[in-house]
Image (spheres, coloured by chain):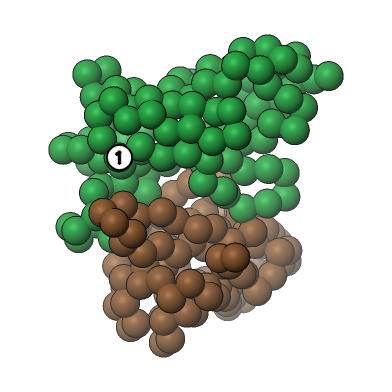
């Protein structure tokens, strides 16, 4: 069974802290993604990676960075957490399967910044 | 750029009622279209997909047809159950082979609540 796991389901951090969110997939997928989910806004892409050490900005990259040192692991970093980064963070992975990408999602990390 | 618009929610239905959740999109070319479902406390799961015009995706009694002429991909189910209560997201991606790497553009989500 395919699996995307995230390091924490719930996280509470203080303003100004550096925060690491980890994501691991066991499907040997090339592509990995970080989204944030906010009510009424759907999911918005923060960053994605199409290969080890390769990354591209998504729609809302400000205040975030990412790291992909191994194919199966994709980390999201909040360099200095702020209250407007309180949100649900979802990781996903995908690969080209016969001309279509299907994304598989982790369970999410609900981050609260106080 | 790509965009997806879903009907305003939330939607509240009685068990065995007919469900429609509207979804329209803006994209160049022939995107792939998806419906994802998110049950309480969980991540998103792929519900169904369609990759070309007039394709019908179906799963668990849900259906959606890729309508190129109206740029729509409406989700339907003939008889909903309490267990269908969830948030439903319409999404699109560019076809494989380009440089989009399967990035998804999502609608804002529709909360469905089904009462016994």
Answer with the quarter of the image where residue A19 lies.
bottom right
| Residue B56 at x, y percent in the picture | 38, 29
Which residue shows up at 62% across the image and 69% down it? Answer: A6
Which residue is at the front of the view, B79 or A66?
Answer: B79
Going by the image, does B80 lie left or right of A45?
right
**A14 in relation to A100, above or below:** below
Answer with the quarter of the image where residue B62 lies.
top right
Q: Colour of chain B?
A: green
Going by the image, does B72 lie left or right of B12?
left
Residue to which mark 1 is pinned? B51
Which residue is at the front of the view, A110 or A81?
Answer: A110
Does the image show residue A41? no
| Residue A97 at x, y percent in the picture | 33, 59
Chain that bears disc 1: B
Which residue is at the front of the view, A111 or A98?
Answer: A98
| Residue B74 at x, y percent in the picture | 43, 22
Which residue is at the front of the view, A112 or B104?
Answer: B104
The quadrant the N terminus of chain A occupies is bottom right
Chain in brown colour: A
Going by the image, does B70 lie left or right of A22?
left
**A62 in relation to A38, above or below:** below
Instruction: Report the residue that reaches farthest toward the right.
Output: B116
Which residue shows up at 59% across the image and 61% down it? Answer: A106
**B55 in relation to B1, above or below:** above
| Residue A18 at x, y percent in the picture | 58, 78
Q: Secondary structure at mark 1?
A: loop
Question: How many numbered circles are shown?
Answer: 1
Does the image show residue B87? yes
Which residue shows up at 54% across the image and 58% down it? Answer: A105
The quadrant the C terminus of chain A occupies is bottom right
């Amino acid at each position: 069974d395919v699996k995307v796991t995230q390091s924490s389901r719930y996280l509470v951090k203080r303003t100004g802290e550096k925060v690491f969110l980890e994501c691991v997939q066991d499907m040997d997928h090339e592509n990995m993604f970080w989204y944030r989910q906010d009510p009424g806004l759907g999911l918005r892409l923060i960053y994605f990676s199409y290969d080890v050490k390769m990354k591209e900005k998504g729609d809302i990259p400000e205040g975030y960075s990412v790291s992909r040192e191994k194919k199966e692991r994709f980390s999201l970093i909040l360099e200095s957490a702020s209250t407007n980064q309180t949100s649900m963070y979802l990781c996903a992975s995908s690969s080209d399967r016969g001309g279509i990408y299907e994304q598989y999602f982790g369970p999410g990390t609900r981050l609260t910044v106080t | 750029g790509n965009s997806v618009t879903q009907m305003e929610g939330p939607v509240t239905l009685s068990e065995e009622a007919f469900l429609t959740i509207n979804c329209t999109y803006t994209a160049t070319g022939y995107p792939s279209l998806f419906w994802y479902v998110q049950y309480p406390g969980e991540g998103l799961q792929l519900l169904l997909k369609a990759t070309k015009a007039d394709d019908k995706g179906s799963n668990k009694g849900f259906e959606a047809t890729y309508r190129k002429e109206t740029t729509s991909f409406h989700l339907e189910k003939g008889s909903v159950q309490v267990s269908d209560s969830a948030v439903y997201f319409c999404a699109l991606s560019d076809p494989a082979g380009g440089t989009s790497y399967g990035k998804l553009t999502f609608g804002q989500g529709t909360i469905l609540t089904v009462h016994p």
